[in-house]
Each structure stands twice: as C-alpha cells, then as structure tokens.
Amino acid sequence: MLQLFEFIGRNRNFILFGLLEVFSFWLLVNNNNYWSVEYFNTANSLNAKSLEISNSVREYINLRDVNTSLAEENRRLNELITTLQQQKPSNAPAGYQPDSAFATRYKFVTIAKVIDNSTHRADNYLTIDKGYADGVKEGMGVISSTGVVGKVKICKENFSVITSILHSQFMVSTKLLRSGEMGTAKWENSNIPSIIQLKDVSRYKTIVKGDTAVTSDQNAVFPPGITVGRVKTFKVAADQAFFEIDLELATDFSKISYVYLVENKLLNQQQSLQESLLNKPK
Amino acid sequence: MNPNDIARSVLRWLIYVLLHLFVARHLVLFNYSFCFIYVGAILFLPVEINLTALLFIGFVTGVTIDSFDNTLGLHAVATVLIAYLRPIIIRYQLGQKLTEGRLQLSIRELGLPAFLSYVILLISIHHIVLFLVEAGSISLLPYTFLKIMCSVLFTTVSVLLAQLLSR
C-alpha cells in the first residue's frame, strides 16, 4: 500500500497528464456533453460579448467589402425592378403585351466608383473607375441609388468620363408623377448644383409643389421611373406659355460615390430608325 | 521568482491568448496555413515552473481556446501534451544552458538557432496532434500533412515576430 502511494507520489505529474488528456478526449468525443453545451461555447455570455466587441472592430475593416456587395445587390434588384415594370407598365391599357426584348432592354451593366467629380463648373463631368474592359460603352445611362446622374461620354479601357446632369447641354425627358405632365429637365441656372430646371410644361396644367419628377417613358437612355428630383418652386412669366419649374435634385452630387451603368440594348435600333426618318427625302 | 516576474508571465500568457482569440484565429493563408499563436503562451512560461501547474495552465489555455471555437477538448488535448513534453524537451535541448544558471526562454537569451529548434519542435508536436485529432481519420492524410506543415511555418513566424516585437 505504501509502495502504491509512493508510486503515485513519484509519478503524480504523469498521472495528472494522463487524466487531463483522457478528460479532454472524453470532452471532444462527446461533443454534446453537458460542459460543452452549458458553458464552454461561443454562446456563453462572456465569450459572446467579447466576440461581439471584436466583430464590431472588424466591421470597420470590412466596410469596403460590404459596400461593394450591397452595391452589387442593388444593381441586381434595380435591373429586376426595371424589367418587371416594363413587362407590366402601370399606365398601360389592359390589352398591352410588351415584347420581351423590349421589356428587358435595360441592362444594369456594372457598378462603378466615382473617383473624380465636379459640381461647380458650367459643364460638369464625373470620372468613374470602370471602362470598356468592364462592359461600359459610350452613351450608356448612369444612375445612382438616389436618382439620375448622367451619361457616359468618353470610355477608355479602365476609366470613363460621364457627362453629369449638371451640364448645360444635357437634357432628360422627365415626367411629374402626380400631375402626369411631361417636360425636359435641363440645368440652366449654372451655379446651384442642387437645382435643375424643368421646361416645356404647359402653364394651363396644375402643378403641385413637392411633386416627384421621374424619367419618362420616352427616354432612350434611362429606364422609366428613375427619380430626377422634386418640384421646389414654379412660376409663370407673364407672356410665356410654359411654367418655369425648379426641381430640387434627388442626387446629392457632392456626396456621390457609387453609380450604376445602364445600357439600353435597343438604343441603336431605335436611334437608327428615328434618324432614317429624318434623312428621308420628303 | 519575484512578484514582478510572475506579473510579467501572467501578462505574457494573457497577451498570447488574446492575440490568438481576436486576431490570429481569423488568419488563414491560402486555405492551408492556420495561425495558433497561443502556443507561445505555453512555450514562454518561466523554466522553473512546477510541472503540475504547467499541466493545469495548459489545460485551461486549451479549454479557453476551445470555448471560442466550439471544439471543447480539441485544443486542450494538444496543449496539455506540449505542456507535459516541454520540460523534457528543455532538459534535452537546453540542458547545457540550464546548468549555467537561470534561463529565460526568449530569443535574446537563447540565440536564434536554439530558440528555433525549441519552438519548432513543440509547435510541430502541437500541430500534428491538433490536426490529426481534428481530422479524426487518416483518409485525408496528404492534405492534413500539408496543412500541418504550412501551419507550423505560419505559427513559427508569428511567434518569432511576437518575440522580436516584445521587449
């Protein structure tokens, strides 16, 4: 008996080692045991709390990736919405059945990051980090999550220049949602980058302040229903037939960071058809 | 060992464990290399520590890491093993230096070759046990060994970096 205790005393560390290993293996093999389920897992409040803190720190590091994936998701959803809207336009008569090629003519090609941006010149341009290598083409429409941005002007391999809607020659066919009136939005008051003018709306129509202006169905570049702005003020000059409407732009151009590029796949066909009509001898 | 030394050892243990839990755990290089820097918490405890205490510290360290990975027992097995083997390897490899007086397990006191041979041997044992137990079978043996080798390299480099950056 004495010898046994002496043996245990001499080899106590080896015995302890053996016991700990066996206990660990037992814990590992019965991975649904009371200990692991009740205390030693990541749902335990201390562990969960510390993981939460470390995760909140890492969230900042991942913010860039998260932004990119959200922008990608938005692109996909926007494309889906446009297609669905085109397949069943809300203002169409009951019998209207759109051609499937026509309904899916708007393709959200890619998402780009704005790397340079001007708002205070007479003609403003944006530069984005995508070019024809990513499927961008000249003449594509550019919109942001908040509204219309512009149109691709120059396209290089990896970069493109966009004519901003804040450009003295840029016109967007626009529709007022509540009154249903159509007009042309154009940036004329070339010093306020948040206001755009809407012209060609007859003075005999009723206009509501705060009405939303969206791109109309007659647009070739932009899908219909993209927000342009909201009616801020409107007045009629004494001898004019049209309203002078000021729209407050939906897109804040000073803060713009991601944009979507939209391609109208039937644009060439539409344009050549319209041009052939113009060139035809009467 | 005066209280200052003890406080320093505790702090070092804590830093290695926290470093693993909040940083190294998320590092995976090329899907093969994992970083288990918490091994340093066992490797750099003072030489003169009692083996019984060492075993318990190893067990607690392993269970702490396990409770964050939801693999209760896995890290404990490997860590208790290296805690048990540590004094043997120190006696075997650093016996010469041990007789010269008090020895501190750091890269400055040991020099790079002795330090590396000590560290790599224990890290290899730890990783081999860890990955083999984790795999649970020998069906994916080549893959597991590739993982072991890459991870030994990664952990060694990170332990080395931690040593160089600490005072």
Image (spheres, rainbow, N blue to C red):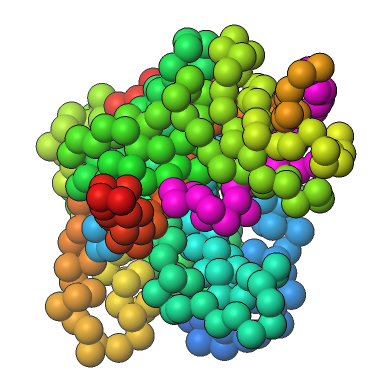
Q: Position of residue B47 (x, y in %)?
A: 38, 41
Q: Is residue B41 above or below residue A118?
A: below
Q: Per the image, is A89 magenta?
A: no
Is residue A83 visible from the viewing direction of this image?
yes
Q: Per the image, is A225 magenta?
A: yes
User: Which residue is at the front of the view, B156 or B116?
Assistant: B156
Quadrant containing the N terminus of chain A is bottom right
User: Which residue is at the front of the view, A248 or A128?
Assistant: A248
Is residue B79 visible from the viewing direction of this image?
no
Residue shown at the point (65%, 22%) measured from the top left: A194
Q: Position of residue B84 (x, y in %)?
A: 39, 62
Residue shown at the point (17%, 68%) measured from the top left: B146
Q: Position of residue A82 (x, y in %)?
A: 55, 64
Q: Position of residue B15 (x, y in %)?
A: 51, 37
Which contiguous range is marked in magenta?
A: A210-237
Please state if B125 lies on the left or on the right of A234 as rendered. left
Q: Is residue B94 above or below residue A192?
A: below
User: Which residue is at the front of the view, B98 or A42?
Assistant: A42
- Count of residue discs: 0
Residue shown at the point (51%, 43%) measured from the top left: A143
- Pick out the residue farthest to the front: A282
User: Which residue is at the front of the view, A170 or A78?
Assistant: A170
Rendered image quadrant of residue A265: bottom left
Q: Is residue A101 above or below residue A51?
A: below
Please state if A228 lies on the left or on the right of B79 as rendered. right
Please state if A143 lies on the left or on the right of A281 as rendered. right
